[in-house]
Amino acid sequence: MTYEDAKIKFISTWGSLGSLWGINKAMAQIQALLFISTKPLSMEDIMEELHISRGNTSMNLRQLMDWGIVTKELIPGERKEYFTTEKDVQELTRIIAKERSRREIQPVIKVLDDVSSIKNDGTEHTKELIKQTRALHDLTLNADTMINKLVSQKQNWITKSLIKLIK
Amino acid sequence: MTYEDAKIKFISTWGSLGSLWGINKAMAQIQALLFISTKPLSMEDIMEELHISRGNTSMNLRQLMDWGIVTKELIPGERKEYFTTEKDVQELTRIIAKERSRREIQPVIKVLDDVSSIKNDGTEHTKELIKQTRALHDLTLNADTMINKLVSQKQNWITKSLIKLIK
DNA sequence: TTAAACTTTCAATAATTATTGAAAGTTTAA
DNA sequence: TTAAACTTTCAATAATTATTGAAAGTTTAA
């Protein structure tokens, strides 16, 4: 496999994986492209490499910046804006986990809390609803807390011993 | 909030959350409905409660069965098929984590491995591609292994002490 | 056997989501 | 100032994904 093949394969795989971490294809592909680039890229560069329109590029770059994954880089003497992505996978994971938690998990935890707090009228179906949604609430809250703690700690002794312990 | 409100809220929230665990809305809603039901439901029951067509119900039930989350339950003397879902959240988590790993994570790990194994021709961009995709590969593999181990162990002392340690 | 009671399949269609590209907006060098 | 070089916005459209519902298929009771 040549460099070009590998690059295309990586970008397209990472792109279709976007759904897994909750972003769209173009967004994931732009991030992938920047992730393996040795230097900041302009909008023009990105459009050309990925064969997508200017509007698409602009919108998705903005979203990546909203996530905090991509940052503008001003190159002295250049009029264009250039872009880079966080290159450290640990830090990238931390950002993504935090954002997903804030955007998706927290609201769900809230709803599960509300739903599981309805008045128990003693009927079987109410009891079941409360029991099951409370179980989901507790599980989701625990998992969310744990993942956030795990990714926040930068591969320190806890994480390391954890990984050993579990493997 | 009344029982009916709570039920509707739970089902619709869980449905829109489907994307988070990689299934579609109707699939997630059917699972949610079964999850809080006190007894097995027929296809007819599900169609009525969720206002979806027979075909849709049939297809999504099959998918849920493929995932191993929903099972057919035959009720003696009844011609219709009835359905139930796994009610234990721990077990549910285990199944979902395993399936997602198998369907989505493993193939990606494979691609990352392939891509990071291209011949290093010494150029800067090749070095960067290899370095970055290898970092992603290692991270993904570690995370996948860890999550699977974590959810497989049924809240035993390791998991419990882990949770304490990390909180 | 057969026909009623059910489930599955799948082409057509609807709904949703992503993408384009041109017009409007903004910034900067001169 | 102004006009060239850029970026953003957004209505129109394309692409993708989900849903319908009727026809075909299957199972079971009699």
Image: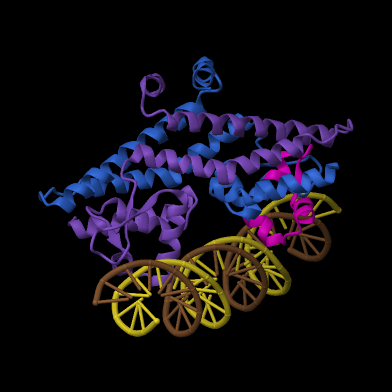
Chain colours: A blue, B purple, C yellow, D brown
Residue C19 place in picture, x, y as percent = 67, 63
Q: Is residue A147 left or right of residue B140?
A: left
From this view, report whether residue A47 is shown above or below residue B113: below
What residue is shown at x 61% (from left), y 32% (from top)? B141
What residue is shown at x 79% (from left), y 37% (from top)? A38
Q: Is residue C17 left or right of residue A56?
A: left
Screen quadrant of the N terminus of chain B: bottom left
Q: How many numbered marks does the figure carry?
A: 0
Question: Is residue A5 among the parts visible in the rendering?
Answer: yes
Q: Nearer the viewer, residue A77 or D7?
A: D7
Question: Magenta segment, which residues?
Answer: A32-59
Screen quadrant of the C terminus of chain B: top left
From this view, report whether residue B145 is shown above or below residue B13: above
Residue A27 place in picture, x, y as percent = 63, 51
Q: Nearer the viewer, residue A147 or A164?
A: A164
State which quadrant residue B78 falls in. bottom left
Q: Is residue A10 left or right of residue B77?
A: right
Residue A17 place in picture, x, y as percent = 61, 48
Question: Is residue B25 among the parts visible in the rendering?
Answer: no
What residue is shown at x 84% (from left), y 41% (from top)? A3
What residue is shown at x 40% (from left), y 19% (from top)? B165
Q: Is residue A39 magenta?
A: yes
Residue C27 place in picture, x, y as percent = 69, 52
From this view, report whether residue A25 is shown above or below residue B134: below
Q: Is residue A79 left or right of residue A68?
A: right
State which quadrant residue B134 falls in. top right
Q: Is residue A165 magenta?
A: no
